[in-house]
Image (cartoon, helix red, strand yellow):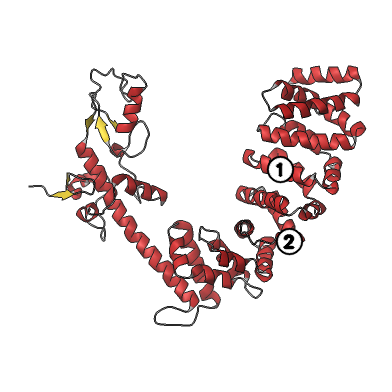
Amino acid sequence: MPQYQELPCGGQVLDIDTALKDGILGGALEPGDAAAGDAGKQPVELRKMMDELDAAGDAGGDEAVPAVFICPISLEPMVDPVTLCTGQTYERANISRWLALGHRTCPTTMQELWDDALTPNATLRQLIAAWFSRRYTRFKKRSADFHGRAADLVHGLRGTAVPRRQPLKGQARVAALRELRTLAATHQSVTKAIAESGGVALLTSLLGPFTSHAVGTEAVAILVSGVTLDADAKTALMQPAKVSLVVDMLNEGAADTKINCVRLIRILMDERGFRPDTVASLSLLVGVVRLIRDKRHPDGVVAGLELLNSICAVHRPARSLIVSIGAVPQLVELLPELATECVEPALDILDALSAVPEGRAALKDCPRTIPNAVRLLMRVSEACTRRALSMLWTVCRMAPEECAPAAVEAGLAAKLLLVIQSGCAPELKQKASELLKLCRLNYTDTLFISKCKLTRTIQ
């Protein structure tokens, strides 16, 4: 007589050991796993279990989700499987949507349906619930272990472990922080345990003028891993000594350390009490620009552009400093090589820098400003076209006799005609018309018209 189990979603299912036998639905139970019956007692609905496992990146643990659990339409595990007259099983919502669109065939076999009734597949539903219940129980057990280990590490670092000991020092401190960083990076829920055990205050206190870069590197990495920073923690992190250490690591650390330092500063900038002059540091700005230029690390380029864009927005005096370190020609040179998602923030920065006289002069003096800006017109997005057009307008207005002919030679006239004839915003078309007039005034009519025709033919 087979053994049956009660499940949280209702009904009964054949013992999970039997259901998993011979690898039909995955591996057998491992030592230490909860029995399927215990998993079935979890007061969690099937969809909630799936969502929590998926959010934690543990939908199948070390096993792949059995193929029979997957809906052929969505390629996601089913919660409410139903069977068609052809014998194929689908998630109810997906097949209902298919039929509602007027289809009268089976999506998998393309057979015509002689009956559109949807028959609940209770057996498969129960097997899915049992399998995910087992995964959920194992996941919860591992999470509890990780949370406990994270709390132990924090108490060891604070010197509040039981039995009470002195706080960890030297290499032992670095090793503990490195393990804590690994736990936070691989298990997002661990960050809550770190915060609850006083880890945020600890990590904040570790950053200071006498902190080694080894300790600082690990502490910053944990702080940006998703740990919630309250107002007190952010205020403490904005102290000059702590900011100075972060800037030093930004300039001298490894690539991942630099990226984490930039992310931490960006987080602090969102705090209401943030002082804009905190980012008015040549050392900080140089470190950020270097990170943006390092194309080997796309995450660093994204993080650096985001921070530099924020600095330009909140602290106008910093714009002149950014120009003074040669950021304008470096960003202009990078434009053709940037990933699509990076082009707009880079143009935003250049647009902000053009608001100061030094920035406008740097744009005009850079030999790649005109050709790179022309290339971006009508290429990435309307916002990018607007920024590129603004750059071209700035340099052509500054030196029309010099820059307007160079812009026409780079193909600007034809691009402006495309903008005018496109579905762009009216103000953008107006700006393009004004720039076109400016170019024509500084270029002979015959050459201007022939250049337009030639460029449009080539394109």
- Measured from the top left, where is residue 172 in percent x and y? 51, 75
Q: Earlier in the sequence, mark 2 or mark 1?
A: 2
In what element is the residue under mark 2? helix
Which quadrant of the figure has residue 399?
top right
Residue 25 visible at all? no
For the residues bearing labels 2 and 1, Cβ distance under 8 angstroms: no
Outermost residue, front side: 272
Asked which quadrant contains residue 108, the reply is top left
Q: Identify which residue is drawn at 22% across, 42% down.
A: 126
Horizontal relation, residue 227 to residue 96: left or right:
right
Query: Real-space Cα distance between discs 2 and 1?
Result: 21 Å
Quadrant, the C terminus: top right
How many neighbours does mark 2 have within 10 angstroms: few (below 14), some (14-19), or many (20 or more)? Answer: few
Residue drawn 77% across the image and 55% down it? 318
Image location (x, y in percent) of residue 451? 83, 20
User: Viewer-proximal residue, 255 or 263?
Assistant: 263
Residue 77: image quadrant is top left
Q: Label 1: which residue?
A: 348
**Disc 2 target residue:** 277
